[in-house]
Structures are given as C-alpha cells and as structure tokens.
Amino acid sequence: MADLTNDPTVPLIAPESPKHVDEGVMGYGGQTHHRPPGEPGHVRTLGLLPLVTLIFFEVSGGPFGTEDAVSAAGPLLTILGFLLFPLLWSVPEALITAELATAFPENSGYVAWVTAAFGPFWGFQEGLWSWLSGVTDNSLYPVMLAANLQIFFPQLESGWPRVVFLVGMSLLLSALNYRGLTVVGHAVVTSSLAILLPFGVLCVLCLPHLQMSNYVRVDWDSVDWPTFLNVMFWNLNYWDSVSTLAGEVRDPGRTFPRALLLAVLLVVAMYLLPTAAALGVLGGGGGEWTLGYYGTVAQKVGGSWLAAWIVVAAACSQVGQYQAEMASDSYQVQGMAERGFLPRALGRRSVHGTPVYGILLSSLGVLCLASMSFVEIVTLLNAIYCLAELLEFAAYVWLRVKRPDLPRPYRVPLPVWGLILMLLPASLLLLVVLALPFINRDLPTVAWTLGAVALGFVMYPALQFAKARGWMEFEEMHFDCANVYEEHAAAAAGGGVAGADMYDNGNAVNGQYGSSGNGNGNCNHHNHHGSAPAGVLVVAVPNGNGALLPTNNGSSGSNNGASAAAVSVVVATGDVEGSGTGGVMTGVPVSSRAGAGAGAEEG
C-alpha cells in the first residue's frame, strides 16, 4: 500500500487537525480565537459593515488615483470609463468572488480555488502572483499620501524628507495592522466616514458651477491609451483580494454576497460623482490633473478649509487602503502556510491573532517599491495581476463544469455558457492590459512579469524538495470541513484516481474517498462506494443520533447516512468503530494503519 502521509496532493479531510490539541503549533498557544478557520474554537471577527469598508478600501478608497486617467484621456473618456468598466470588469469579478469565497471560506482565498481546480502547483502560482501584485499595490499608498500632502508640505516632493516620510509611514501603518482585524475594521469604518463627508460637500458646492460642455471634451490625438487603461483598470480591480479574509468573516455564505453588492455601489458612486463634479467645474486635460489635484479643486470651490478637509480625507483613504491591502496580503501568506504551500513557520500568529511573518514579508516588499512613481507602480502590478486573474477565471469555469455539486452558499444564477459570455469582455481586457508592456517595449515591466513567472516555477519544486529533505516543516495540505472535499488520488505505481465527481461512484487503487459539507460545517452525506485494494478509505458517517459506524476491511468500504452534526474523519486500514456525543464523533480503529496488530488511534 502506498504511504499517503507525506503526499502533498492528498488533502486530510477533517474538521479537527492536530493543531486543535497542539499548544505550540503555528503559534496558536492554545488560545482559541487564534486557531485556523474551520477548527473548533476559531472566532470569526468580521461582520457586514467592516467587510464592506474593507472591500471599499481594497478596490477604491475614494476618487484619489483617478487624476492620471483624466490627464491621459480627458473628461469624456474618464466619465465613460467609470460607467462601462464596472459593468465589464468589476461586476463579473465581484460575482466570482462572492461564489467562490463562500464555497471556500478560508484565508488562502483564491489559492484554494485554483488548487481545487488545477492542483497545488497552479495554486502556488496563483498565490505568489497575487501576493506580488498586492504588495506592489500597497507600495502606492504612502506615495499617494505624500502627493496629497504636498499642497501644504512641498518638502515631500523629493529628497530625504520624502524618503523618511515613506519609510516611516509604511512602518507605522504595518504596526497598526499587527494589532488585529478588529482594530483594522474600526479604522477603515472611521476612515470611510471621513472620506464620504468632505466629498459630499465638494459635490454640493460644485453643482451651481457645472458646465456641461466640459464633459464632452476629448483630444483623440493626444490620448495616452496605455496609461488610461492601466489607471482605470487599477482603480476598479482587486475585488478578489478580500477572499483571503474569508476565514475571519462571520456567516460568510450570507455576509459575502451582501457586502460585495454594497461595495460595488459604494465604489462606483465614490469614483463617478466627485470626478464628474470636479470636471464639470474645472474641466480636464492640459496636464494639471496630477496626484493630489482634488485638494486644488476643493480650494478653488470652497476655500482653504475644504482643501484641508480633502487632504485629511486623502490621508484617511491611503491609511484605509494600506490597512485593507496589508490585511489581505499577510493573511494570504498565513493561509498558504496553513494549507501547506509555505513553511509552517510563516503561519505563526501574534498574540493579537495576526500573521506575524505575513506582515513582515509584505512590509518589506512595500519598502522596496515605495520609491517609484505612481504610474510605474500601477503598470508593474497590473501585469502580474492579469496573470492571476486569468487563472482564477479558468478555475471558476472549470469548477462549475467539473464540480457542479460543490457546496456553494451563493451561486451566480447563470449556466456555464452564460458565465463564459459574462467573463469574455473581462478576459479580453486582461489580455490587453497584459500585452501593453510587451507592445510598448516597457522592459522593466516585461522583466518584472517574466521574473514573477520564473520565480513561481522555481520556488514550488524548491519548497517541495526542502520539505522532502526535512529542511523545513510544512503543514499537510488539507481542506477543512467547512470548505470543499475533493477526492485526490495519490499517484503510486500506476495507481488510479478517485471518482470524477464528488457524488459519483468510483474506483481507486491506493486512493481515498471523502465526503462533502456545506459552508457552515454541517456535513451532508451521500452514498459513496469505492474499492481500494489495500487502500485507505476516509469514512465518517454519523447517523442522526451521533453514532459513527463505518467499516473498512482493507479492501472495500461503504457509508450511508446523514447528520446535521459536525463530522470527524477516520483514516485507517482496519475495522473501525466509534461513537460521539453532541455532534463530535471519534473513531477508534481496532487495528493499526498497517492492518495488523493491536492498536488504537483517535480519528
């Protein structure tokens, strides 16, 4: 029989892992609110309002950053862009995030989606590309904050004052993120209010002075299409980033779709209304629209008091965006460590429950990139982000085709062909943005993109080699009970694969079977029949009274039953008996894993 213990492709399908009773694992120290998502005792801290504001800051944070789009293309194309791009790009990405984040409510987010579809190699590439893009994106916000403050502090334009400000602000904001998602959630809710109020006042003051002729101005010959597309794309992307916080969201099946709907409306309004108001009064073009221009608009319309208020709003926006992005990037590192993609040590949490090394690594990346200009950073991050998004789109369609019965608390109400049509314009946009650096011979961006691809292709086998040699400790790759259950076969000497569908019958040589569950951890069992000569059968079939009565005689097994209780899993090659109370099941095999001799093991 093949030994599956150290096979990284085989998920351990269990609601309880050894981390539950191991005081020292991953830095949890037995503190229940620091346990991984899906395990008993883990407390989800994010509700609807903090999640809406986190999404708002992941994607937008206000109209700051739209200035370069106006400068590149003029008022008409900018207004049209903020009307069309949300329909072609933001809505499809938000819908995909709502469906898959509720199916996989864990902190590895899109890494879990791609892994479920295409296996751990491509899941690792998705994680690396998304993390690199996210860290690059986060390096923008200290740069934007410095630009907005220049109206009162021109010293921040260049030199040592700028360097000290960028480094100090990055470290300060990372320290705030270290204090925990509760602190971050309160910070972004407060920041949202600080942004909405002054821009509401700005829009009202602009109304009497609007000139409709300003909106139709465009100089087609001078449009900088690469800059315009990159800035528009950046302003409306990253809807999927919040999926890396799914393990921290209360009732994700209900909360995620509602939060994404509210966030889409908020983001579109906060881009379109202030930008249209400012353009209606002052027009655009001529190069005057640069980072920080909204402070100039406020000063002309309302005076110094409104300009100061807008600068404060800009500061709140950049702080909120930094916090939201840092949370997603750092929790993604922690989630990938819990998944077994990265060394176990990178999953360590602080006394506040935050990812220690995830924050350190993400902060280091921010510091390395913060010296670049706004447009340079946007171009770099967009190219890598496009690679990750194309992989997510492919995984989404694949899971709809191959896993139609995957438990999805929220499901986009379209058939597969409708989903493909919905994603077609967005996919074409991704390909265009990805191709722009190559067409324009932007060598730094091309090198950055190809380097990210090469890094991922080298890192994954290198980490697997280190794991095999015992140089680093890794968690075993597994799916928690609240998520998806797949039948991954361990390839061994021509061994077969498990059944093609989670609810179908199938045969496997040296393979395994699992069960399925919904997003709340209550498992719904269907009949499974499989034969595995000298194989490993994963069985967990409590009946309505909490009794667990699976059997496996070493050659075949069966399970039948249903329960509203949580499910435990027993992996054994001998006969198994077990019972449980209150929905917590345990199983004790009467023979050892080798199928001979006496022994006992808790499942």
Image (spheres, grey):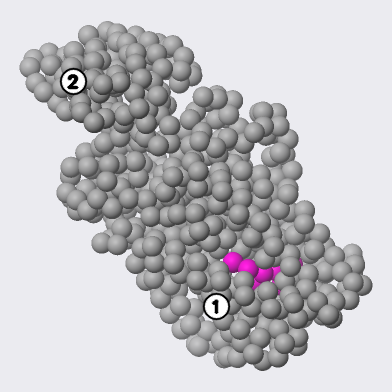
Structural crowding at the residue carrying mark 2, measured as other residues with C-alpha within 10 Å and reported as few (<14), some (14–19) or many (≥20)? many
Q: Residue at x 49, y 67 (%)?
A: 188
Give whichever of 196, 495 is nearer the camera.
196
Give whichever of 514, 412 is nearer the camera.
412
Q: Please indicate whether residue 229 sits to the left or right of residue 263 in the image.
A: right
Quadrant where the C terminus is found in the figure: top left
Which stretch appears magenta?
61-70
- Residue 508 drawn at (x, y percent): 38, 13
Whether residue 421 is situated above or below residue 159 in the rendered picture: above
The number of numbered badges drawn on the structure is: 2
Magenta stretch: residue 69 in it? Answer: yes
Residue receiving disc 1: 315
- Residue 536 drawn at (x, y percent): 28, 18
Residue receiving disc 2: 578
Q: Secondary structure at mark 1?
A: helix
Magenta stretch: residue 165 in it? Answer: no
Give whichever of 586, 370 is nearer the camera.
586
Question: Disc 1 marks which amino acid?
Answer: Ala
Residue 332 appears in the rendering:
no
